[in-house]
Amino acid sequence: MQRKEMELEGSLRSFTVPDILQFLANAKMTGTLSIWREEYHIDLVIREGKIVNSSALNRPRKLGDMLVYRGFLKRLELMEVLGAQKNLDRGRLLGQILLEREMINKNALRDVLKLQLEDEIWELFSWQDGQFKFEHRKDIDTSNIVVEIDIEPLLIEGSRRQDEWARIIKSIPGNEVVFAIQNVPENFDNATKLPENEWMILSLINGIFNVGSIVDRSGLGKFETYRILNTFISSGMIKEKSPEKALREVMRDSAPTGVVSSLKNVLTQDSPATESMATVSASRKGFSSLFSRSKPTRERTSIQLEFISPLGAIAFFVNSFFETLITIEGFQRSGKQEDRMLCSLWKNTLMQFPKADIICISNGRINVKPLELIIQWENDISKAIHECFDDSYAALMQLTQIIYHIAVERLGDKMATRITAGLLQDFIANIKFKHAKSFELRSWIQEILKI
């Protein structure tokens, strides 16, 4: 039987996290330090006084997003590996799978894991309440250790940051805050001598992304991103935007003014005239007529749908699905703005997939036309816009899943499945694409919704 020996246990009101870590480092202890309060729980694995692992590193989506944002991994590659992790590679760590498939190297993985782990630990330094328990163990599995952090330098840096952090959070109260650029001097251009990291953070401030999204996408960690944002606030260069204005920014009829840089060379004045995004005979209400009362003998008319890429088809399905749901008794909730639900859901989705920001809400519907037209001009999903396409594809997939789960919650599993199947049955066979002809929407919907 595995032998465990209790060494330390108590309240963070009596012993701070730095105090505990200092003791474990000095004594060169080996074991697991558990720290928790309310619903948050983290386990730190200590080997001979050094931190070598954390339960926080087992969050595959967090690690995967960081690898994507820092350019080590493509979005669709991450989606493929996460799918494999749930099936063939169930129970295995994301980092292990990526290394074995030679999709990243060990140094890249180590850098990202170290940043993620340090951010998690520094966050704990400010805790003044909670519980901790250290279990002394000598049988720590060292086979999968990628990162090793000395505690002493961590404590020194953490102490330095705590004082500055107390000042920063007075200006930036949390990850949900949205900032917009204002009062930029006329002579402020590329010649302005800002450090590279500050230029990068500045480029992410667009009145849509919240601070949490900017932290994730910057790859600099929470403290450094907050510090740079606080510098911009102090100089009057950026200002907090109200939630209502940030939501309206997502509701527009054209591409955002700060559209991603990878599209700049594609949008030119010499671009040829374009065709419409999709030739659709269906009404604006999409498939909602399927659930209206009609004569049973009436034959349904075949509808031909032509899209430039799968994005158009997915967006059409999402719009039709949502518009069908809000016509069904029992789906809408009294006292809530259901007409704004789709916009709010899309805004929240963009926080995780920021390169999908060229997609917007127009007249209450998901509008992929700006990106679809660029794909058409390029006659292909070109390399210049591939990252935008991948993020948009992943974002629309997640939005589809979210709306379906809301339908299940409000209408029940059987009703949600019946509605989805009804939307797919009569129309999906007639979809055609200019690109990605092998994409089959019915199978795609059934797979991601598990129906």
Image (cartoon, rainbow, N blue to C red):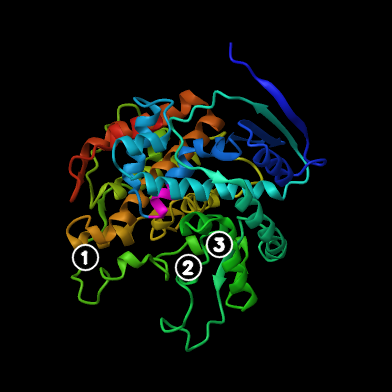
Quadrant placement of the N terminus: top right
Report how far apart the C-alphas of labels 2 and 3 lie in the structure.
9 Å
Q: Quadrant of residue 255?
A: bottom left
Name the residue at the top extreme: 1
Q: Which amino acid does label 3 sit on?
A: Thr
Residue at 29% x, 37% y: name it: 101
Taking the image as shown, residue 135 lies to the left or right of residue 145, namely right
Residue 402 location in percent, x, y?
A: 48, 39
Q: Nearer the viewer, residue 133 or 97?
A: 133
Q: How far apart, in angstroms, are the residues tagged by discs 2 and 1?
A: 38 Å
Q: Visible in this render: residue 331?
A: no
Of mark 2 and mark 3, the one earlier in the sequence is 2
- For image coordinates 25% across by 38% down, the residue present is 301
Whole-angstrom CA distance, mark 3 to mark 1, is 40 Å
Marking on residue 225: 3
From what the image shows, is residue 95 above or below residue 167? above
Q: Which mark is residue 195?
A: none
**Could you tell me residue 308's position as x and y percent?**
23, 53
Q: Identify which amino acid the numbered label 2 is placed on.
A: Asn
Quadrant in which residue 372 is drawn: bottom left
Q: x, y (%) of residue 191?
A: 42, 84
| Frontmost residue, 135 versus 92 | 135
What residue did someone put label 1 on? 274
Q: What element carries label 3?
A: helix
Q: Are marks 2 and 1 in contact (CB under 8 Å)?
A: no
Q: How crowded is mark 1: few (under 14 residues within 10 Å), some or many (20 or more)?
A: few
What is the crowding at mark 3: few (fewer than 14 residues within 10 Å), some, or many (at least 20)? many
Tell whether 438 sits left or right of 100: left
The residue that appears at 34% across and 25% down in the rendered structure is: 88
Label drawn at residue 197: 2
Q: Dot 2: within a 10 Å radius of its alpha carbon, few (fewer than 14), some, or many (20 or more) residues? A: some
Q: Tags 3 and 1 in contact by the CB under 8 Å rule?
A: no
